[in-house]
Amino acid sequence: MSKLVITDLRVTVDTEDGPKEILKGVTLTINEGETHAIMGPNGSGKSTLAYSIAGHPKYTITGGTVTLDGQDVLAMSVDERARAGLFLAMQYPVEVPGVSVSNFLRTAKTAIDGEAPKLRTWVKDVNAALQQLNLDPTFGTRNVNEGFSGGEKKRHEIAQLELLDPKVAVLDETDSGLDIDALKVVSDGVNRFRAREGKGVLLITHYTRILRYIEPDFVHVFVDGKVAESGGKELADQLEAEGYDRYLKPATA
Amino acid sequence: MTVTTDSVRSALEQAPAADRVESHLHPAGSFEVSDHTAPTGREEIWRFTPLKRLKGLHADAEFMRSATSCMWNTPEGVRVEGVSGDEARALRGISGLVPNTLWAARVLAEVPSSLLIDVPADTEVAEPIVVDLDGQDVTVTEAGHVAMRFGAHSKAIVVLNHTGSSTVAAVVEIAVGDGADVSVVSIQDWADDAVHLSHHQARVGRDATYKHTAISFGGDVVRMDANVTYDGPGGSAELLGLYFADAGQHIEHRIFADHTAPRTKSHAVYKGALQGEKAHTVWVGNVLIRKIAEGIETFEENRNLVLTDGCRADSIPNLEIETGEIEGAGHASATARFDDEQLFYLQSRGISEQEAQRLVVHGFFNDLIRKVGVPSIEDRLLTTVEAELAKNVLKDSAFGSGA
């Protein structure tokens, strides 16, 4: 089972002028096997939602709840959330100098599973995951995200998704900066993950392009810190044709 | 926590009219002890050093009979032995060193013997020459002189391994012959009470390659000056340093790449970590590009990772340029705490805070450790970093994770 329930989530960040509310009451339920796309203009708070779920210290939760299978996610530390089954594929993955990809992957897998993976199958799994994402086998010897191209960073994120096998994956603008070939490779990886039993996906994107490769069950339009409209995948087609203007105008009226 | 980076001194100083800039990089040295006075602590080259904790080594401490055991291996084709009398006197200044401090002048004038490491020309020694210096009595103030002579086109690695308790002033002179390939590693793995004042001076021959690695973990006060000059064009010096200061420790590293010949290179990387109340590190990176030194390349870098409150890291790159006809010159200095974004990234993959900190610290040092080039020392460094982490980072986080 995997069910992520976000209820009336309110989040602020500290600015020079004091706390600023970014999320203004987000309510969303992702049942197992469902893929939800969150689409919205820049600055609408999409990434804040992703990072708040993962527990980034920059964001202050001022109200609401987030539960995963009934467990209080907001009470957990960042690493506890990951071990509970949450995964965030980041828009800007962070460089960790001097730490090799293979060491990083093994350490993360050991932390998630609570025991070290069996060496023989693990090496095979890692090589397979890297290969499926068109990453060279020597990739494992490179330092985490250091000197990676934009595409390599995103493919590395999806390799982690497949290897760490969370319950719910939050993908924050995984499509941004990818050419069409890389987009297909990354989408294939996400689809392989979706095909596994009971997985939930929250796909955050600015563009409809990735939704041609990863078909969502639900689409939510995110405007000014909350969900402005929800619908099926046809909502994405409508956004493709009309853009976000329709949602932005009433906000200023 | 106090973190300072003295950016004013790091400003590029150019003197197109005069041949030289007036600075501490142009001392009037002398072998005569009477030409020197004891420092007061206000001098540019002494302003960071806690003189009171040096037990007089910088001034008039008696250089007593040594209480430090000294053992070494002697690979085939190499001479390693203590020499005295005329032979020892002849070795004073073989690196071109002319003392600019009272203590170094005293060491050269007063210490009766020298440890000579002599690698003849064209001799390649695969096995590192390891000199183990183990201090037995910290109340004995003593001094030593080491002379390393590497003949033309020789190749060798020398390791000076300092352990135990000692109060010692040491001058190490290194003459690197033309075309030679030399690595000198000095490990300061002292007990907590040791006081170690040292000056390593190297003269790098034409087209020679010289690597100097300073590794400082232990001791109450450790100050090392690692200097390089060049005896001809084409010489290359790599100056590496790795240090880890705990509560109360003062670890000070000064380097000076004096580009005295054209088309020479210097590349310095020093990295340090600090933890505990009143842990203090100092790095001063001096580079002088003399008028004659056209076409040289230099880069120096110092990075400090501050692991706890109450530490102080001083980092001062200092570049003086007397000719603009160079290939390149640069420096970088950074002192920071743990990067929250790195820790968040690792923790978001399920890795606990303390394990994430451990990974980041190992990662911080890893690139440097791989450059040392002596496998047994690289392994030992990994173990030492782990042991240092156990003192603070790993211990603290066990309490802090629930907060």
Image (cartoon, coloured by chain):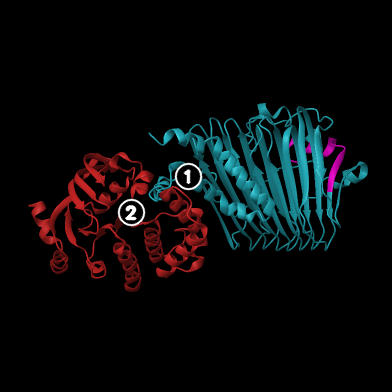
Where, quadrant-wise, is the C terminus of chain B in this rendering? top left
Nearest the camera: B258 or B49? B49
Q: Secondary structure at mark 1?
A: helix
Q: Based on the displayed image, in which of its 4 quarters is residue B388 positioned?
A: top right
What's the magenta region?
B99-116
The residue lying furthest to the bottom in this view is: A181
Q: Based on the displayed image, in which of its 4 quarters is residue B58 positioned?
A: top right
Q: Residue at x 86, y 57 (%)?
A: B76
Q: Along the horizontal axis of the image, is B368 left or right of A55?
A: right
Q: Chain of mark 2?
A: A
Q: The chain coloured red carries which letter? A: A
Q: Is residue B108 magenta?
A: yes
Question: Is residue A176 in sight in this rendering?
Answer: no
Q: Along the horizontal axis of the image, is B388 left or right of A198?
A: right
Dot 1: few (<14), some (14–19), or many (≥20) neighbours within 10 Å? many
Q: Is residue B356 magenta?
A: no
x and y, in percent, of residue B319 in the image:
59, 50
x and y, in percent, of residue B156 in the image:
77, 57
Query: Residue B355, labelled with which disc?
Result: 1
Q: Residue at x 24, y 61 (%)?
A: A206
x and y, in percent, of residue B189 in the image:
68, 39
Q: Which residue is mark 2?
A: A88
Q: Residue at x 85, y 55 (%)?
A: B78
Nearest the camera: A176 or B7? A176
For chain B, what colour was chosen? cyan
Which three-letter amino acid code belongs to the residue tagged 1? Answer: Glu
x and y, in percent, of residue A117 in the image:
47, 54
Label 1–label 2 contact, CB within 8 A: no
Nearest the camera: B219 or B401? B401
Which three-letter amino acid code belongs to the residue tagged 2? Answer: Leu
Q: Are marks 1 and 2 on the same chain?
A: no
